[in-house]
Amino acid sequence: MPRHRANAYVGAAKAASRRLHGRVLWSRLTSLLPVGLLVWGCMAWAQAVAPTVRLTAGGHALTAELARTPNERMRGLMHRRMLPPDHGMLFVFEAPERICMWMRDTPLPLSVAFVDARGDILNIANMQPLTLEPHCAAGDALYALEMAQGWFAERGVRAGSRIQGLERLQRQP
């Protein structure tokens, strides 16, 4: 009988130890949660903060995040819920071509200006959020500049207008 009672105590002690270990583990995990959220937030912020360039379109200054690599161009402004005033994204391609853009996973309504190697706007298209409808350049474009929908029209920027500041990109590696 004492042997069974000892086993019962050992079993109860093991169960209590497991519960305590579970609580300690949970306590440690929940204490790390704010740190994990902070790290995740910093990673998301670092992804969102890309190198920028200051440009001028029709005499109006703007700041554009650069999307130069295939991965950066593919991600574009996906999942962004807002853009600061006079901010957008400049897609830089390796060589002039008939570029097409769409709005997969992009909840913002945007306008895109297709720009040739000289910096002249070929055409501007308004794009609806979360669609795969293609919007294409009217000619061979080296750049595509996305801004909040209506930004170009509100400033009188249209096909034939020139984007100033692109020459700085050609000097950067």
Image (cartoon, helix red, strand yellow):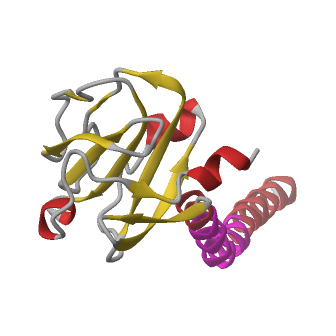
Judge from the rendering whether residue 57 lies leftward or rightward of residue 166; answer left or right: left
Image coordinates of residue 121 in percent, x first then y, are: 30, 44
Q: Main secondary structure of the magenta part?
A: helix
Q: Please, is residue 143 above or below residue 8 in the view?
A: above
Name the residue located 15 percent from the left edge and 65 percent from the top edge: 156
Instruction: Name the residue located 23 percent from the left edge and 27 percent from the top edge.
Output: 138
Give the side of residue 113 with respect to residue 155, left or right: right
Reply yes or no: does residue 129 show up in magenta.
no
Chain part drawn in magenta: 22-43
Residue 61 position within the rendered picture, expressed as x and y whole percent measured from the top left: 40, 74
Q: Nearer the viewer, residue 77 or 57?
A: 57
Q: Position of residue 42 (x, y in %)?
A: 63, 69
Quarter of the rendering occupied by the C terminus: top right
Q: Is residue 38 magenta?
A: yes
Q: Quadrant of the N terminus?
A: bottom right
> Image quadrant of residue 148?
bottom left
Residue 40 image-quadrant placement: bottom right
Quarter-of-image position of residue 22: bottom right
165 versus 122 height, above or below: below
User: Whole-percent x and y of residue 98?
Assistant: 34, 21
